[in-house]
Image (cartoon, grey):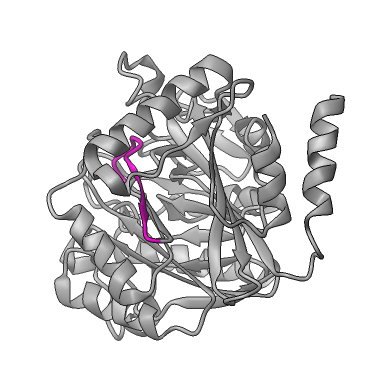
Amino acid sequence: MGKLLFIRLMTVLSLIPTFSQADVVLTLGGDVNFNRNLMPVNPVGVLFSSGTVAPWRSLTKDIAPLINGDLNFANIETVVSSTNNLSNQEKTFAFKSHPAGVKHLIDIGFNLFNLANNHTYDYGHEGMKQTLFEMKALKHSSPQINYAGLGKISEVFEPQVFTVNGLKIAFASATIGMPEFAARDDSPGILIVRDNASYRRLVANMARAQADFKILSIHFGTEGKVTLDDGQKKRYEYALEYGDVDLIVGHHPHVVRPVSQWKDRVIFYSMGNYLMLGSADITKKADTNLDWGLFSKLYLERDPHSGKVRIDAIEAIPLTNTHYRATPLRGAEARLRIEGLNRLSLQELGSNALQFRTSPNSGRGVYCGPQMNSIRAKILCTMP
């Protein structure tokens, strides 16, 4: 560590009274599945058409060091099942991943999962039941994990509330999808975001949830399109205003969309791909707005004066090779993507655009709030 950087860090540390204020670091990414389209599952790893198997660890080795938050989120865009006897819905793209793949994610630190998306029902109602069975088994063996988005009506409309580092977190999910797979009293399913009555009910339940910080995961948007869909901004901001939601994590378009700062709350309209083994190789796209996925790290802290939990800082790291082995971009390549995201956010959101400064060394994006109390946020914002 250079002498100047050491002095800066010591200065920051000297201004921090104690560790007593609860803080949480939350990591986020977009779409994840652990299998190729229509391929059988394998407990060892991902099976390729050539007959070779890529072990789980070989696929995550480049992102595993990033999964170091207190809360690490992934959108599981696949049916989870250990059987190859399920019948798919004659969909062009149907994904089924072995629970050993999700167990591997848990082993490297993932502990918060969204199950609500348009691939949840790739293998019909039976596939949804299999996913719930396997996730409940994983929860039994790894009680630190939480998930939402798939279940009966009483389950999908009520946010999950759990405690991390002294902070109560509420988490819920909504998605695009076919009405026949909506949750029912007697059958598991999803909460459909385009159903206005269901969406308003979910938002009202989020408002009533007793939690310090509220996260809503939304699977929505035209695939391959970086600009916002008609009505998307209004629909998302409705949840912030009327549901007391602090953070919306968006996914589905498979590309990165703008990032919004709405008052003291944040919307990621789309994180893009994270580790999507069934997707195309987007690194071949010539447009640098389309060829990457966004990994983000949020630093949450309870304000010692107001008691309100807020986002003190955000780190943004572009990912490449999200179709096979997600790898962080660095230097000029990372900086190019973050600067493009800043321009896109300004274009789509104007004064509500969240803007990242780029690190001259790593190229990552950093947002630093005006009143930081988190020690980890202060260290981040001191780094060059």
User: Considering only vertical position in the picture, is 65 above or below 313?
Assistant: above
> What residue is at 78 percent from the left and 55 percent from the top?
15
User: Considering only vertical position in the picture, is 322 above or below 139?
Assistant: above
Q: Position of residue 158 (x, y in %)?
A: 40, 81
Q: Position of residue 129 (x, y in %)?
A: 40, 69
Dominant secondary-structure state across the stretch colored magenta: loop
Can you name the residue that lies furthest to the left here? 230
Residue 108 visible at all: no
> What residue is at 32 percent from the left and 26 percent from the top?
290
Q: Nearer the viewer, residue 256 or 377?
A: 377
Query: Which quadrant is home to the C terminus?
Result: top right
Q: Nearer the viewer, residue 239 or 286?
A: 239
Q: Position of residue 124 (x, y in %)?
A: 29, 60
In the image, taking residue 195 as reference, residue 241 lies left or right, namely right
Q: Nearer the viewer, residue 218 or 309?
A: 309
Q: Position of residue 358 (x, y in %)?
A: 52, 28
Q: How many marks?
A: 0
- Residue 95, quarter of the rendered image: top left
Asked whether residue 232 is drawn in magenta, I would say no
> What residue is at 48 percent from the left and 54 percent from the top?
83
- Residue 67, quarter of the rendered image: top right
User: Considering only vertical position in the picture, is 150 above or below 376?
Assistant: below
Query: Which quadrant is home to the N terminus?
Result: top right
Asked whether residue 262 is drawn in magenta, I would say yes
> What residue is at 15 percent from the left and 71 percent from the top?
196
In the image, taking residue 300 as reference, residue 352 lies left or right, namely left
Residue 141 visible at all: yes
The magenta-colored residue range is 252-263
